[in-house]
Image (cartoon, grey):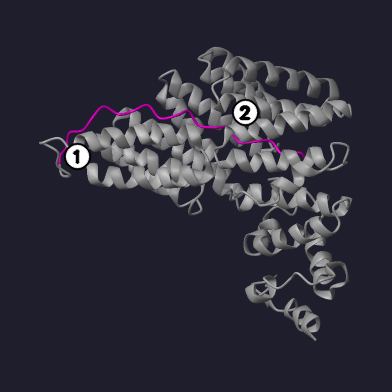
Amino acid sequence: MFDKFCTLSLTYRSGGFITMLAPLRDHLRPKDPASSPLLNAAKVYYFSRLSVRIYPDKPGFEESRWIISEDVNIEHLLDILASVSPSSDHVWDSCAKFMAHLFWHRPRLVMLGPKIEALPDDHPFKPQCLYDLSRLFYLAGNSTEYKRLLTHSLKLSREREDHFQVGLRLRDLCEANRGMGLYKEGIRQAKEALEIFEWLGNTTKQAGCLVSLAYVLCEDEQLDAAEEAASRAIDLFPEEGDQYLACLGHRVLGIIYQSKDNMEKAIHHFEVALEIAFSLNMDYQLFWVHYALATLFFRQGRLDNAHTHIENAKSHTTNGTFNLGRAMELQAHLWYIQGMYEKARSGASHAIDVFEKLGAAQDLEECRELLRRIDEELNSPVASDESDVGGEPLETSPLPACIDVPF
C-alpha cells in the first residue's frame, strides 16, 4: 500500500515537474530497494531526463533547468542505487550527467564523492565521474580538490589512450593551476591540450584551449601573447559559431585590455560578452561579466558604477555559493575605501562564512586580511561609518575562466 501511494505521488506535477514530497523521500529506504516500485518508477523517469549531456547553444539546454527543483530527489535516488548496484554502468553514467546538470544550473557540492572515488580504476565511468565531480569543487573555489580529482581522471584517461578526454582534462588542469598561481604549468598543459585537438581536427576545442591559454598568459603578465591567443580563439568561430565560447573569448580580451590600461577596448569586449551571456540566459556568465565591469570601475575610482555592477552580479547568484562570496568580498572592498566600515565588516563577514563552508582556502585568507584591516579602522579613534576617507583599495583577484564541457 505504501509503495502504491508513493508511486501515485510521482504523478503529481507542479510547474511541469514531478514533485516528490519530502516525508516520502526520507522513507525511500525499503529493505529490498531493487524491488521497490517507487524507486523503479523514479529511476526510469529521472534517468531518462538525464540521458544526454548538456551544453549552452545546444538543443535541450534551457529545458534542462528542471534540475533546479528536483536535484535533492535525484541525489537521494543515486545514493541509494549506488549502494544497491555499485557496478551498474547506468547508475554511474546518470551520476556523471546529474553533476553536469548541477554545474550549469545549480552549482553545489554533492554527497556522492566518496562512492565515486571508491569505484575501481577500471570502471568505465570513473574518469567521467571524477571529472564532473571536480568541476563542482571548481565552482566552490576549492582549487586543491579540483586539481586532485582532475589529475586522477587524467591518469585514467591516459591509460585508456582516450586522446579527446586527455585533451579536456589538460585544459581543465590549466584552469586549476592558474587558480593556484602555477602559471608555467598551466601554460604547458593548455599548449599540450591545444596540440591534441589540432591533431584531432576539433576546431571548437582548439578555441576553448586558446581561451584558457589566454587567461593563464594574462595572469603570467604575458599580455601580448594572451591577446594573440584570445584573438585566435574568436577567429576560429564563424559568425554563427559557438556563442558560449565566444562569450569567454570576449571576457578574457576585456581582462587583457584592462591589464593594458586600454579601458575603452576593455569595456567594449565586456559589453559584447554581456550581450552574449544575456542572450544565452546564463547566470554564471552574467555574474562574471558584471563582476569584471565592477572591478574595472572600482580601479578607475568610479565607485557608483562599481556598486551598480556588483548588485547586478549578485542578482545572478544563489545564496551560499562561491560567486556570492566573491561579490560580497568586492562590495566590502568598496565600502572599505569609502570609509563605510560597519557595512564593509558585514560584507566581509558574510563572504568569510561562504568561503569557510565551501573550503575556498585562498579566498578565505584574502578576505580575512580585508576584515583585519577593516577592524583596524573601526578600532581607530577617528573611525566613522559616514567618513568619506578609507584605506587604499586592495587588489582583487583575477577572474577565473569558465570550464569547457564535453558534448
Above or below, 396 against 228 in this view is below
Of residue 317 and residue 58, the one placed in the foreground of this image is 317
Instruction: Give amino acid for label 1.
Output: Leu
For the C terminus, the quadrant is: top right
Residue at 64 percent of width and 35 percent of height: 146
For the N terminus, the quadrant is: bottom right
Local packing at callout 2 (Cα closer than 10 Å; few below 14, some 14-19, many 20+) is many
Asked if one can make out residue 112 in the rendered structure from this viewpoint, the answer is yes
Q: Position of residue 232 (x, y in %)?
A: 66, 21
Asked if one can make out residue 238 in the rendered structure from this viewpoint, the answer is no
Answer left or right for 84 relative to 340. Answer: right
Residue at 17 percent of width and 44 percent of height: 385
The span from disc 2 to disc 1 (Cα, nearest Å) is: 38 Å
Q: Position of residue 281 (x, y in %)?
A: 58, 51
Residue 398 included in the magenta stretch of the image: yes
The residue where tag 2 is placed is: 175
The residue where tag 1 is placed is: 378
Instruction: Give amino acid for label 2.
Output: Glu
Answer left or right for 5 relative to 37. Answer: left
Give the magenta-colored segment's residue range: 387-407
Above or below, 391 against 76 in this view is above
Residue at 57 percent of width and 37 percent of height: 142
In primary-sequence order, the first of circles 2 and 1 is 2
